[in-house]
Image: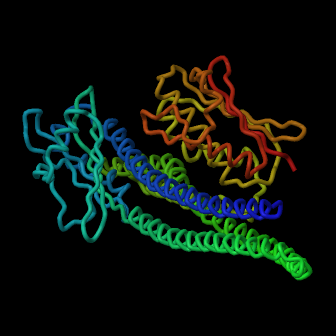
Amino acid sequence: MQQHLTRFRASTIFNIFAIGLIIITFLIYEEFKASQEDIIVLNQESNLAYVNSISNNLSEDLTRIINEDFYSVIKDDEILIDYIKSDLNLFITTKYHSISLIGKRDLKDEYFIYFVDGSKNSHNKKDFGEIFTLSDQEKLHKVYRDKKPLYFESNSEKNLGATYLYPIIVNNQIEAILIVVFSLDGQKTLLSILDELTKMFETSLTFFVLIFGFILLFSYADTKRERNKEKTQKKLERSNKKLAKRTEELKIEAQKVQELNATLEDKIHKEVSKNREKDKHILQQSRLAQMGEMISMIAHQWRQPLAAISATSASLNLKAQLGRADKETIIQKSQDIANYAQHLSTTIDDFRNFFKPNKEKQLTSYQELITAVIGIVGVSITNKNIRIVEDLQSQSLFETYANEIKQVLLNLIKNAEDVLYEKSIKDAQIYIHSYDSEKWAIIEVEDNGGGIDISIIDKIFNPYFSTKLEKNGAGLGLYMSKTIIEEHCKGKLTARNKPNGALFQIKLPKG
């Protein structure tokens, strides 16, 4: 009787184990589906954040040079139209293939006309005043009513595309609409890859369910066989003549149980190995999600050099129009643009190698790093009446990833610039101070913009946390900066409030 109960318990445990494996497999599959949806949403949000960033930059640039009725200002000014075309063309790529500026002659006008067509396709390029046609005109009227951007996708047999309508508002009045038309082929490719992964996972899931079903069937057959043997055993026990034979059979059964246990252990090892393979699939999905983050980071780092290139080219264009573009100016401005373009290229290389452990360090100093950064953003900052005060006392040379440190300093200085400009601080200044301690080379970036709200100061380094959500902040700049300083460069990045503003401190190890 005791042996019967033991076998029954072992069979039950075995069955529960097999059912548990089936449930775990389904849970992993559901988790994969949820991750797949998160990747798609992240990719869509990245697209929307980037095109909104483009539109916001263009809107700020246009409202700086036109602060009244767009139609009246642009109508008879060919030089201004050419400038706007060049400004729009800065953001034209194979993906963002059309950026146009449209509007109305007056509020009563039912039709929208082209102000500037920024597309590079000269065959269909529209001139000022031509009627702009959109299959769904209600979308344009909705932007005028709501004064909010509008995003929609269009899907054809050949490609997948999207359109972004961004209102340019002056004195609470819509003066024009930026229309950005771009391709979603990258998203289409991502969806195709995820579909392939889903098919592979579903095939694997079907295989596992069949295996687990076979295990349950085997367990049932084995249980039934054991019950039949129990009946035979009872008959043998009634006969004294067969007692010796039954004893031998019991020994054989014990040996079979040991073999079954060994087989079960081998199967467990195999299932553990399969689970490790599943972990690799999940890790791959995590890496796909990181791709979306990297795209947002690149967009964040490109804004400053792109704005500098736009300002430099506009300055050069204006001097040429006024006949003041001498040879030395053209050479200098061209070299500036080349330097900014080289910085963009370097940024791409840095992000491409972001997680590689074999990047080479360079011997550098804070003096060299700050000189390079100020060379990029100095003109933009001083043009906003913000004074940069440098007090670089550190004499240390240290080995580090120089380009990544430049990106962090660029981000901190740009954040300070944004706060001072948005708050219209009088006598605005950014104070950059470096010095040495026994173990550290230290640099601090301080502003007099009033400081960080005490309720959020502990959250500013979290990913996707931003105080600029209304201005389309991605919330990745400070998170990325802390990752670079503390994980890649083995330093420390902290923030605290001073009496007049915020202070960010970077500590890098010496030697």
Q: Does the image show residue 407?
A: yes
Colour setting = rainbow
- Residue 2 vs residue 69: left or right? right
Q: Residue furthest top?
A: 499
- Residue 405 vs residue 399: left or right? left
Residue 172 vs 31, above or below: the answer is above
Q: Does the image show residue 336?
A: no
- Displayed quadrant of residue 501: top right
- Displayed quadrant of residue 224: bottom right
Task: Depth check: give the residue in front, 20 or 386.
Answer: 20
- Displayed quadrant of residue 441: top right
- Residue 434 vs residue 470: left or right? right
Task: Depth check: give the residue in front, 48 or 503.
Answer: 48
Q: Position of residue 283 (x, y in %)?
A: 63, 61
Q: Position of residue 172 (x, y in %)?
A: 26, 26
Q: Position of residue 187 (x, y in %)?
A: 40, 61
Residue drawn 88% across the image and 41% down it: 439
Number of numbered discs: 0
Residue drawn 61% across the image and 38% down it: 462
Residue 340 vs 455, above or below: the answer is below
Quarter of the figure with the N terminus: bottom right
Residue drawn 73% across the image and 52% down it: 488
Q: Position of residue 374 (x, y in %)?
A: 60, 43
- Residue 465 vs residue 506: left or right? left
